[in-house]
Each structure stands twice: as C-alpha cells, then as structure tokens.
Amino acid sequence: MGRFATTVDLYEQFRPPYPVAFFGEVARRLALTKRHALIDLGTGPGLLALGFADHVGRIVAVDPEPNMLAAARQRAKHAGRDVMLVESRAEDLPEGIGPFDLVTIGRALHWLDESTLGALFERLVAPGGVVAVCASSSATDGRNPWLEQYTTARRDWSDQELWSQSRSGQRVHRELSSLLQGTTFQADEVIRVESVNETSVVGLAQRVLTFSSSSPAALGEKVELMLRDVEARLMPMSRNGVFTEFVVSTAQIARRR
C-alpha cells in the first residue's frame, strides 16, 4: 500500500481547492485549445487533469497509487470526461506515450527523481509545449491568522521524517529554477490566481489527515486524538467554528531554453 492510499477519500474534500478561474486563466495565458494534449503526473484523484478538461483535448493522468486512480476514474465518469489513466511512476512511463503540449505536476514534484527530470521532460513535452508545476495553498501573508496555529498542530502530529520531506516538497516548488539547472528547461512566468473560501474547524482538522506525514496510516489509533486536539486549538480563533480562507493557486511555467 502506498503512502497516500489512506488519504484518498479525504484529499479532494479537504485540501485547498483550485478554483475554476485558475484553470481558465492558465488556459488563456497558454492559449490552450481542444487541439492540445495534456499529461498530469502524480494526478492523485485527478484534480488538475479534470480541471483542465474544458480547455484541452486528449488527457492522460498518471499515478503509482491505484486507489488514487480509482478516485480519478470515478471523478472522470461523474464529469463525463474521457481520461486515459496510467498506473505508473512518471519516471517509468513507456516510450512513445507523448508528446504533450502541457505537462502538469501538482503536489508531486518532490517525489520525482531529480536526476531524471531533464530526460523525462524532453520526451514528454512537444515542441512549443510547456511544463506547469501547480499548487494551491492557504495564503501565508497574514490574511489567514489561524494558519500558524494549524501548521504547528500539523507538525506536532506528524511523523517527523515525513514532515521534513513535505517541507522539502514546498522548497522544491519555490526553487524550480534550481531544480531545472542542467536541463534544457528553465522556469519562466508564474500564473497566480487568488480565491476565498469558507472552511470549518472540523474540515481543517480533517485536512491534517490528507498529508503523508499525518495520514490515517501514519497516525493509526491516534486519529481521533489528533482531530480533537486540532479542533480544540483552532476553535477559539474561529467564528462559530468557521474560518474565511484566502487561497493562492499558482502555476509555475517551465519552457525549453
């Protein structure tokens, strides 16, 4: 069982969402049309793959976790979308699967083998195509005053080795230029869209379970204790158990040099 197997049912419901406007803005900036093909690496439940479905033609979604692909399959069926699902690590994709006009990667970039990125992008990205490294997270500029307390609670309940890996993953997103050194690709523009949602204390506590470092598999019998603790920490800061959450969604674009 993969490290995200026990987060499948929680991931889509409790992670900060990509708003519809994000997909429209990326599509506009990249001039996407139904003639274009997309592959989403580390697709999870298919949030990016299906989010871009209105703006591209062929869609391939890749993930090594079969439970995540099952969730993506259900979402695609519910949305009436034709998506090719591939159970594989990105590095193990067969020759000839591409090329694609858009290669998307969400919260999976830091799980990829850095030494293979150049060769992987070379064979997946069509001439004139791009890589879009996407993320959606709570704004860290003070507009979410509960965020520091929430992050502290997450850290306190996380497997510390996996927590360090997740922090490394955030750095990877910030340091895309360094990651692409030595490849034929370089970081270009960053497309940024902000949105505002209402989120509950209960939902934020459940969000802790969507991370590999504090998943149900990692916490085991401590799940209920964690939920009660996080809710107790956050409730005094809330408005009747509800927060306004400012979310920043970004797409870091990488192009051939």
Image (cartoon, grey):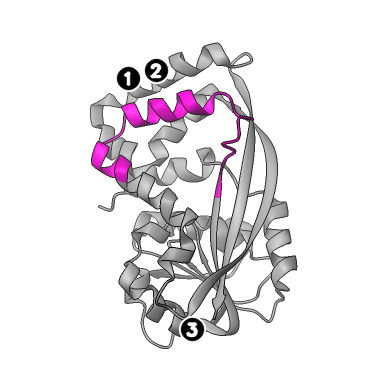
- The alpha-carbon separation of the residues under discs 1 and 2 comes to 5 Å
Q: Residues within 10 Å of mark 2 (few under 14, many from 20)?
A: few
Q: Nearer the viewer, residue 253 or 178?
A: 178
Q: Secondary structure at mark 1?
A: helix
Looking at the picture, how far across and down is residue 11, in whole percent? 46, 44
User: Is residue 102 inside the magenta stretch?
Assistant: no
Write down the residue under mark 1.
225
Left or right relative to 254: residue 195: right
Give above or below for 247 relative to 188: above
Q: Are marks 1 and 2 in contact (CB under 8 Å)?
A: yes
Q: Residues within 10 Å of mark 3 (few under 14, many from 20)?
A: some
Q: Residues within 10 Å of mark 1 (few under 14, many from 20)?
A: few
- The alpha-carbon separation of the residues under discs 1 and 3 comes to 46 Å
Residue range of the region highlighted in magenta in the rendering? 136-164
Q: Is residue 253 visible?
A: yes
Picture disc at residue 98: 3
Write down the residue under mark 2.
228
Q: Secondary structure at mark 2?
A: helix
Q: Nearer the viewer, residue 116 or 240?
A: 116
The residue located at (72%, 67%) in the rendering is: 29
Q: Amino acid at mark 3?
A: Gly
Which mark is first along the chain, 3 or 2? 3
Picture disc at residue 21: none
Q: Secondary structure at mark 3?
A: loop
Q: Nearer the viewer, residue 240 or 129?
A: 129
Q: Is residue 102 visible?
A: no
